[in-house]
Structure formats: structure tokens, C-alpha cells
Image (tube, rainbow, N blue to C red):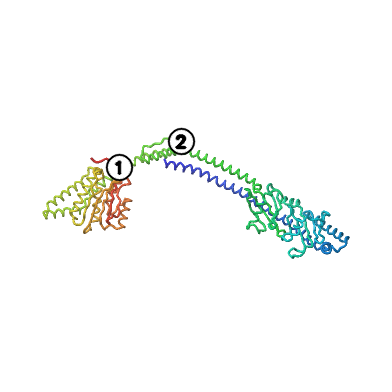
Amino acid sequence: MNVFKVFHVGIFTKLLLSFLIVMIPIYGISIYIIQSAENNTREELSQSVASKVHFYISSFENEMERIIRINKELIFNDDFQKIRTIAAELDDYTRIQTILNVKEKLNLLKTSSLYVQNVKVYIPSLDRGIFANSYDNHIPEDELYALKMSGSSGSKITYWKKSLFLSEVYPDPFQKLPLTIALGVDLSSKKLQDTLNQIVDKAGAGASFINLKQKWSFSDGKSDFILPELRKFFDNPAINGRTSYQGSLNINGMDYLITFEYSKLLSTYLAVYIPEDNVLGPLDKYRKLLWLLSILSTVVVVAFSYWIFQLIHRPLKRLVTSFRKVEKGDLQVEIDHHYSDEFKYLYGQFNAMVSQLNKLIGEVYEEHIRSQEAELKQLQSQINPHFLYNSFFILQGLVQMHDVQTAERLVQHLGDYFKFITRTSAETVSLEQEVSHSKAYTEIQSLRFSRQITVEWEELPDLFHKLPVPRLILQPIIENAYVHGLEDKVADGTLTVRFEAADEALRIKVEDNGENISEEGLAELQHNLRSHVLGKESTGLLNVHRRLKLRYGESYGLTVDRGAAGGLLVVLHLSTRGVDQVE
């Protein structure tokens, strides 16, 4: 069931990915077009705003520079010189005429520029002021103070009572001499606001003059709530000191496009701020439509993919379910299909395959049985001639020494040995019989190697006496230990046989302390057992290994390793699960 779920998800995922692979490039191109349009619009707007800011700051700076130049010229005009130096020495007529001339020149300055609202001059020697717009001669103390101090700030433009004015004083405050004249030009707030309004006319946008030295700002009056955040923005060390800038700034959760340019003459910034939503709003609408289209397209793709998936899912599910039954060994599966489509052909081929597979499995199984029987018979017929000769030579020696009792025991063991070897009627024997035959073999070998090899047999647990096992699975292992491990042992040779019970399994361990097996030879033998390769010295081991796997499955058979005594350790893994006992 889990395998089918993986298959189920895999088919649906592949269908979905196939449609998405087609859609993603189209979607990507759409995103690219909208993003390019947004970037182009932003760039064009930025260039347009930057051009306007540069034009207006340049125009305003030129106009202020002209007014400042006129102010300086007026300071040193003859009438101004008289009024500030020898006004007390002039007669009344000349003084009045001089004041009228000064007033006329102030009026000319006022009418020379739309930015000028009023022009006034303060004469300390007369302790009075002269105005271009009126005959009033009184200047308020706070205004007079601002007029006198404006020159010391280093900026030609000064902010006072929400208005701006240009000032010129003589002598320069830095000379620390008594003031003789102060000239102030009041700038028209309305004209300045009209000028700022002309820079940008978009909703929510605004423009402002900002002076960091005197900490004042003058705006168009449309978005004054932005000014505190804007002043903080200019106080940033990364921004302060730049002559121009364009970038984004988030104010109260809204992104603004900020553009400014600095006037060195006026020590003032002209800043323009435009809400990005007002500029990119139409593009944002298209972006939202694209997202909506993307969601709808995704829903359609998923629904269409699922419909196609269901269209092929049911026939595939039947086919996969049938394959699972075949995996579990059910070879009687047959699928019927009533529609003339591709699945009818697949089902027909599946039915033919299962039928052919059933036939081949029967043939292979019979072949395995015949092969097993042939191998068993071959093993039974492989009576080692050296073992036979040595046994008769030992018997001859015993007879010559008149050791009748030992000779009789040897004959008995030989009889049991050859009786078991030559009996072919049963394919399986009880483990007790197999162990008894192997003990007879070790008894015969003990007469030959009585002083060289000691054999230790652990008692077979009663539970496994009647356990059915294939014939000749233990004696070939013991014979292999004698022939390849202990035959060259002059003394102190040991051979032990132990039994270990596990969960539904039995392990028989045969270990010797021979010294003939090298690490390379051990590795080769392990490889041969894993790959069923017939080694030149392991025919008996491989034969037993094959027959155990054929009977019990791939988890059983033989394993070999280096034993604790230094020789070869062979472990037979037998299954005790679901096997009837031999009577």
C-alpha cells in the first residue's frame, strides 16, 4: 500500500510539473514585462523629477544671486552711503531727498523680481527703517534682531515667522565693527509656494526648501506632516553632505520617491517627495491582475492534472495491485478490461506474462530440486580416497598390534559412516542423525590424529534433536577443517562444535585453530560464499551453503570469519520456524 502511495504521488506530481513547466516561462515573461515597465516608469519619473528639481533650484538660485548682487550694490550706492554715514550732518531737505532716493531704489528692487514682497533697510545712525511698500519707519525688535543676525549664520537666506528673507549688512559681522546699515528683502511666501507647487502636481506629493544650519523648512503646504521625517532623513550622515540624491524613503508606512539638490549659495536643499503608489499605481493594478490570473491558472492546472491523473489512475491502480499480488507469489492473477484502448493491450500482455512466469517458475523449481538432488548424490559419492586409505591403514596397524577393541570400534564407526554416506532414500534427516554421523567421522579422524587434535562437542539441545535438516551439512564442514586447517598441525590442534539457539533460528559453529588460512584466503572464501563462486578448496562449503539457502531462503546458509583461536570459524544458519519435527 505504501509503495502504491509513492507511485500515486509520483504520477500526479509529474503531471502537475509538466503543466507548470509550460506555464512558468510564460508567467516569468509576464513578470519580467511588468517589472521592466515599472523600472522604466520609475527611471523616467526619476529623471523627470531630477530635471525639474535641477531647473527650479538653478532658476531660484540665479534669481537669489541677482538679488544678493543688487543688495551689495545698493549698500555702496551714493545715497545709501550718505544715509548711513553723514545723515546727521545733512540738512532736512537733503536728508529727506536722500531718503526718498533710497526708497525709490528699494522699490525698483522690489518690482524687479516676482519673488520680492517687500524691501527694507535699517539705518542705525537714524535709528529708523526705510520700506519700499510704505512710509512706516519702525522695524519690530525681533525682526531687527533676525535681520542683524542673518549675516552671522553664513547663509544669505533667513527664515523668520514662517517667511524667508535675504539680508545684507555692513560691515560684515565677522569684522566685529559697529553696524552701519542692514538691508532685508522679504520673499513672497505665496510666490515661493506657487513655484514649489509647479515642480510636482501629483496627489500626495510635495516640495520643500530645507536648511540644516538654521534648522528651518519651507514647503508648498500640501504634505507638511512629512517634514519632520524628512529632516531626520537629511540628518543621516550617509545623506548629509551630498549635493544631489534620488532614492526611496518609508514614511509612516508609505514609500516615497525622494529627490533633492543642494544650493551652496543659499545653504539650502530643494527636496521633492512623491508617493510611489501614485506613480506605480496602474502597474500595481496589473500586478494584482497577474497574481489573480496566476492563482486561477494554478487552480485550473491542478484540477486538469488531477482529472488526467484520475483518467489513468484507475487502470494503473489495477495493474499495480496485480503486480503486488504477483510479488507476493500469487500467480493466478488475471485482469479483464472492456475498453479498446492502450490498457487493454497492457492487461493482455500482463496476463500472458503471468502465465509464462508461472510456467517458468515451475520449470525452474523442478530444475532446482533436480540440481539439489544431484549435488547431494554427488556429495555422497565423493568419498575421499585418502580418508579411506588412512582408515584402512589405521585398521591394519590395530590388527597387527592385536588391539582388537580399538579395531572393533573403528570398524563400527566406519560402518556407521559409510551407511550414512550411501543411504540416498531420504533428502532430509534429523539434526540428531546429522550430528551422530559427524561424530562418527571425528571419531575415525581422532584415531589418526589422537595426539595432534582434540575435538570438543557441545551437547545438542533436546529441542532440536528431531529438527529436519538437509543431509550432509555438518560433516563436510568438519572435513574441511581437518583437511585445510588442522592436517599440518603437529600438536595442540583443537576443533570445537557449538550450538546456539536464536529467535526461530539455530546456529551451529565449527571452529578450528589452524594456521593455514590467510587474510587474503579468508576474504576470497567470503566473497565466494556471497557470490556463489566455486573455489578450488571450498566445494563442500559452497555445496552446503547452496542447499541451505535453497531450503531456508536467502537469510540462511554459511558465514565464515576468523575465529577467536586464530583459525577458521564457520557458522551454519538454520531456520527452526514452521518446520515439523522428524519422527
Mark 2 neighbour class, 10 Å CA radius: few under 14, some 14 to 19, many 20 or more: few
Q: Position of residue 320 (x, y in %)?
A: 42, 40
Q: Are marks 2 and 1 in contact (CB under 8 Å)?
A: no
**Toward the viewer: 273 or 289?**
273
Q: Is residue 389 visible?
A: no
Whole-percent x, y for residue 547 in the image: 28, 46
Instruction: Tell me the residue that label 2 is attached to.
Output: 340
**Percent coordinates x, y for residue 371 in the rendering:** 28, 45
Residue farthest along the top direction in this orientation:
338
Q: Is disc 1 placed on a helix, strand or loop?
A: loop
Upstream in sequence: badge 2 or badge 1: 2
Depth order, front residue of 120/71? 120
Residue 21 has which mark?
none
- Pinpoint residue 230: horizontal percent, then vertical percent: 66, 53
Question: Which marked residue is nearer to the observer: mark 2 or mark 1?
Answer: 1
Q: Is residue 271 left or right of residue 69?
A: left
Q: Is residue 539 in view from this perspective?
A: yes
The amino acid type of the residue labelled 1 equals Arg
Q: Which residue is mark 1?
A: 577
